[in-house]
Amino acid sequence: MHPAAQFLRRLSRRKLVQWASAYLVGAFGLVQVMDALADPLSLSGQFRQRILFLMIMGFFVALVLAWYHGEKGRQRLSGPEVAIVTLLLVLAGAGTRMIDGTQEIRTSANEAIGSVEFARLAAAGDGRPTIAVLPLTNLSANPENSYFAAGIHEEILRRLSLVRALAVISRTSVLQYADGVKSIPEIAAEIGARYIVEGSVQRDGGRVNIQIQLIDASTDRHIWAESYTRVLDDIFELQSEVAQAIAGALQAAITPEEQERIEARPTENLIAYDLYLRAMELRLDLKDDLQTAVDLLRRATDLDPQFVLAHATLAFFFEVGAITHSLPFGDSAVARADLAVELDPGLPIALVIKAYTTARRGGQYEAGRTLANQALALDPSNGWAWYTLSMASLWAGDPVLSALEARQGLRFDPNLILLNHSMGYAFTRMSMSDEAAQWGNRGLTLLPNDQWSLYALQWASVSAGDLPAAGQYASKMREAGGDNPASLFNAAEVYIMQGDWEAAEDALRQVNPRMSWGQSPRAAALLGWVLTRSGQPEGREGLEALRQSRMQRVEDGSALIQDFGDLAVIADVLGSEDEQLRWWLAAAQQPRGYWYYNLQSSPYVDRIRGRPEFQSWLRETEEKQASQRRELAAVADWTPDAVVGAGSR
């Protein structure tokens, strides 16, 4: 008999086909049951992947069992059978662990974000209609009323964003379309919106007219339009009516709680509201404008101490002034944020600024994340909340989660430059220099000479080992930042890596113009190090005083990462190798631990670079970063074009 015929007879005797058919029918039935119960039982995608994989492996186990036991009377186990089944079970176990591994980052993000259903939002689309409201045209006879039209636009957006059934593109991402050059389909494609709202505002004495139209960008067809005329005293009711009409035209369900918030009057004082609108129109990247905006908001809150929206916005402006322009607003930001949340714990912007100050200034990262999540539960499209969440994760030592959260924020606010910064920071932290540089360059297209985009490019160059390029970016950042201590300090660090003591001293003395060793301690430690290395006695004397103050903080338990870093820098010139190593490793263990690429290139660790303990830390950091890069690569493409689209700048 032909061998093939003999093989077929053996298959028939052992009922291999029958076993396989029965298994496939049973597996198909199980899949149908699992699909039917997935929603009622909240079965995760990860669980279902495991079951499907195990069913596939089970098919091969069934074939092995049929081969050895399908023939009548053959019941005893054999060695080859046991070996094959064992191998299949080992492969099944390894496969399920691999599925768990690829889902780990999604699971951690889902647990961290909780109430805003991160896993659902992480999908290509979350099912909500995506809408963008373009800047409203000012048709008033007085061009100065442009601030009023901009304020109406901002308020309609804010009220629409309270409808959780809608995904609302933020104001920062639509401002570039105020010139009306691009078509509706082009704009929609660039910012990822299905629906576009456009219109105009005309203020004539004590009356206001708003004309609004809603367009389906996929067909460029107008699906709803309305004209509203009200007296100025009814401006809040008018804004609420427009927002609810837009939501109604999209058949978006509004809960009673959402409707109550949409209809809430932010203030009863129209003069205070006018001051608020004028402040919102000013540019925060200009120091004089920001100071004017702060003054306007202070006057508004003086007129109405219950004007919580003004308090929260003022807290935000204080924080911007402290970070970007070195204005002495840090403590004021915290106090105003606390007051805003106390006045209205359900106002998203109040929760966001409170979250940011809690994480950044208080070092309470989880508490900050909790507040940011509360804001996102109320307004899932809030780009500022996603940025705060992302930065809190980065400060807590999780750049992978930080990048994921920034990515989600960019879905709703693709041109919010802060989210762009967050992407650059996260990739720099993982030594992903190419990705960090791409996001840095994108930031410069959003805002030319932006100092924090230059910051990302500077450290991406350091990470890539290109110190000449890093020096060029450092000088550009210093020029863009003016007297901003952060820009000066970061530029000085690169100058030190290049061995340019004179440039480093010049930058650091601008941070501490009167050699005030307590004014900016981080810069003081580096300045003292530079002066001591240059043979200037002033440096050693200053470092001695600084060491005493830092040691006091260590002893009383109040030391922060910068205190350990300062002590390590000081020990390089005033202490032993063991002392320096101890302080560097202590700093590296903090959540905001010193960055790997920084210490790789900094001359103030040259003395301990060859120590086994330091080399061990470098290897551990390299392995950790490699693992983080693998996690990100398993999730998505991280180029700007992939995240925000080629059309979005």
Image (spheres, rainbow, N blue to C red):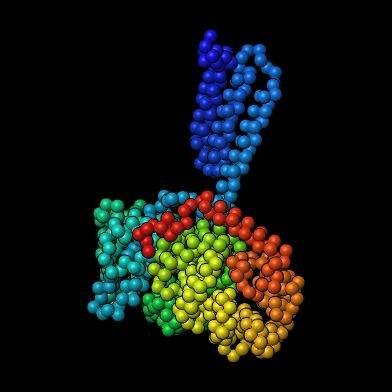
Q: Residue at the spot x=61%, y=14% of the render?
A: 71
Q: Residue at the spot x=62%, y=42% of the render?
A: 97
Which quadrant of the view contains residue 624?
Answer: bottom right
Q: Residue 16: where, in percent of width, then height?
A: 56, 19
Looking at the image, residue 573 lies above or below residue 610: below
Q: Residue 109: where, in percent of width, then height?
A: 56, 54
Residue 43 relative to residue 79: left or right: left
Residue 220 relative to residue 300: left or right: left
Looking at the image, residue 256 lies above or below residue 151: above
Q: Quadrant of the C terminus?
A: bottom left
Residue 174 relative to residue 317: left or right: left
Q: Residue at the spot x=47%, y=65% of the render?
A: 437
- Numbered circles on residues, count: 0
> Does residue 358 appear anywhere in the picture?
no
Furthest-top residue in view?
1
> Foreground: 141 or 230?
141
> Foreground: 625 or 587?
625
Looking at the image, residue 454 lies above or below residue 71: below
> Does residue 144 appear anywhere in the picture?
yes
> Foreground: 95 or 122?
95
Looking at the image, residue 473 lies above or below residue 28: below
Q: Residue at the spot x=73%, y=75% of the render?
A: 554
Q: Residue 358: where, in percent of width, then height?
A: 58, 70
Residue 644 relative to residue 628: left or right: left
Q: Residue 370: where, in percent of width, then height?
A: 57, 62
